[in-house]
Amino acid sequence: MDSRAVRVTGGRHAQITDRVRTEFAVLSGMPESAIGLDRFNPYHRFTSVPVSSLAWRLRAEGYRTVCLHPFDRTFYGRDRVMPNLGFDVFLGEEAFAGAQRVNGYISDVEAARKAVEIVKEEEGCVTSTP
């Protein structure tokens, strides 16, 4: 399997696990084969040490990095992992007070609105070092 590929399987638990794997693979660039047994929950292994990531690279270029996750910030230990992946700010479900929900979850439209709001707030604040 290509090191950039992430396997997707069926079933609700498998889909959640696949989302976490995909999220971690995109952020870290780390292939599933390098993670070993922790590939089912890569965040379990990487909660206490910084891990090379896209967010760290952007920060090194002078960008402010914000992770927006419309769910419980402690799920999969993201509240501990995201700073180690290089995010300046991690916003969870608490950032969506009053947001529209679909089947109990914050809607994709609301997540997109919040992302646009954050980008607009950051305009003029986002800089790059020479």
Image (cartoon, rainbow, N blue to C red):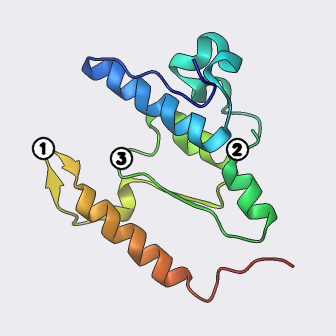
Name the foreground residue: 22 vs 107. 22
Q: Which residue is mark 2?
A: 84
Image quadrant occupied by the C terminus = bottom right
Instruction: Give the answer, above or below, for where 12 lies relative to 109.
Output: above
Marks 1/3: CA–CA distance = 13 Å
Measured in 3D between alpha carbons, the distance from the residue under mark 1 to the one under mark 2, in whole angstroms, is 31 Å
Q: Secondary structure at mark 1?
A: loop
Q: Position of residue 96 (x, y in %)?
A: 32, 63
Looking at the rendered structure, the kind of residue marked 1 is Asn
Q: CA distance from mark 2 to mark 3?
A: 19 Å
Residue of label 1: 103
Q: Residue furthest top?
A: 37
Circle 1 residues within 10 Å: few <14, some 14–19, many ≥20: few
Please identify the quarter of the rendering in which residue 127 is found: bottom right
Residue at figure coordinates x 67%, y 37% from the top left: 29
Q: Give the total of numbered labels.
A: 3
Q: Earlier in the sequence, mark 1 or mark 3?
A: 3
Instruction: Classify residue 58 as left or right of residue 1.
Output: right
Q: From the image, which quarter does the N terminus lie in? A: top right
**Residue 49 image position (x, y, % from top left):** 77, 35
Which percent across, then down, holds residue 113? 32, 70
Mark nearer the N terminus (2 vs 3): 3
Q: In screen coordinates, is 71 left or right of 32?
A: left
The residue where tag 3 is placed is 71
Seen as rendered, the residue at the extreme front is 2
- Looking at the image, residue 15 sits to the left or right of residue 36; the answer is left
**SS type, badge 3:** loop
Q: Position of residue 59 (x, y in %)?
A: 74, 63
The residue tagged with tag 2: helix, strand or loop?
A: helix
Give the mark, 1 or 2, whose residue is nearer the N terminus.
2
